[in-house]
Amino acid sequence: MKNKIIIGTRSSKLALWQAEYIADCIRQKYPEKTVELLHVTTKGDKVLDVPLAKIGGKGLFTKEIETAMLENKIDIAVHSLKDMPTQLPDGLSLAVVTKRADPYDAFVSIKYDSFAALPKGAKVGTSSLRRKAQLLHARPDLQIQNLRGNVNTRLEKLEQGQFDAIILAAAGLKRLGFGARIREILPKSLCLPAVGQGILAIEARTGDKEMFSLLQFLHDEGAWQAALAERAFLSRVEGGCQVPVGVHAVTDKDVLTVEAVIASLDGTQLLYDKETGPVSSATELGRKAAEKLLDEGGLAIMQEIGLLKD
């Protein structure tokens, strides 16, 4: 029986909040166990002056942590599910996912109350191609500019006047106590969220049955089924976290609904699909949405930006 559990985490304030939250849950459930954090620096943390899409590769915020787990330096890792590639390294698996927090994107501005209130040519900061493509589809007049760094850094850049508004994940802002900074939650009709947005995922070694069993009290089945559908969609379009696609799945009793978009980088093309079916078909529904959008022009969009081969 393992008496000490070591959690691997990035060092950003949001990553630490997430890891500490899970650590506290484990401590409360198992007061006899010691839980410690090990800080790991990832490639995505080191390179801050280049847009994520240009760094290339998948697992920008997870690879080094996963290596530490495979080397038995840590027992589990806590991630934002939206940062996780759909293909995990051999020997590692998703153990549990937590109940989903707010999955949507937040509009943050000092001057303007809403996205619609932005004047023509306004500067909007985001590091996400997904957000950029969808926002340009709605407002081609805007200047969407790259914004990197942790949540605090991004808010500071807004306060310095570098942007008229910035777009951040609502869940991260709320977890860090910045919920009051949100001027508007962007509706999904404007900007579908990223795969797994708002869900915390705990990764463990595949054969570690003790750890899987220990963590089950944190597991949320609704979030799991939504994640299956969303990750199946992303896997089919062969995209990492930096692709111009949005997908969001919602469960209602035994029914699951998946909404998805593939957009061109400049926002001129935006393809949308909605699939509904039994929760038990979550993976199939995600793949079905992907196939439809690829057939309707998504394949050409992805090929054009070099994300899919013939």
Image (tube, rainbow, N blue to C red):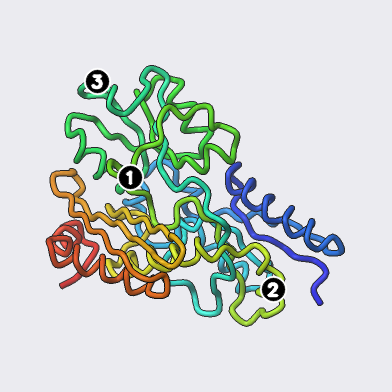
Which structural element holds mark 3?
Answer: loop
Above or below, comparing residue 208 to residue 149 in the picture? below
Residue located beneath label 2 in the image: 211
Q: Farthest residue to the front: give it.
A: 253
> What is the quadrant of residue 237 in the picture?
bottom left
Q: Nearer the viewer, residue 261 or 85?
A: 261
Q: Residue furthest bottom?
A: 207
The residue at 54%/70% (across/down) is: 94
Q: In the rendering, at what x and y percent does residue 266 appear?
A: 18, 43
- Residue at the image point whose x is 20% and y is 33% from the top: 139
Q: First in sequence, mark 2 or 1: give its number.
A: 1
Comparing 32 with 83, the one in front is 32
Tell me the distance, in whole angstroms, between the alpha carbons under discs 2 and 3.
52 Å
**Residue 188 badge:** 1
Which amino acid type is marked by label 3? Pro
**Near-viewer residue (291 or 156):** 291
On residue 119, the disc is: 3
Residue 87: x and y, percent? 42, 72
* Count of marks overlaid on the render: 3
Query: Mark 2 touching mark 1, by CB under 8 A?
Result: no
Query: At x 39% / y 36%, what residue is drawn?
Result: 167
Inter-mark Cα distance, 1 to 3: 22 Å
The first of marks 2 and 3 along the sequence is: 3
* SS for dot 2: helix
Q: Amino acid at mark 2?
A: Met
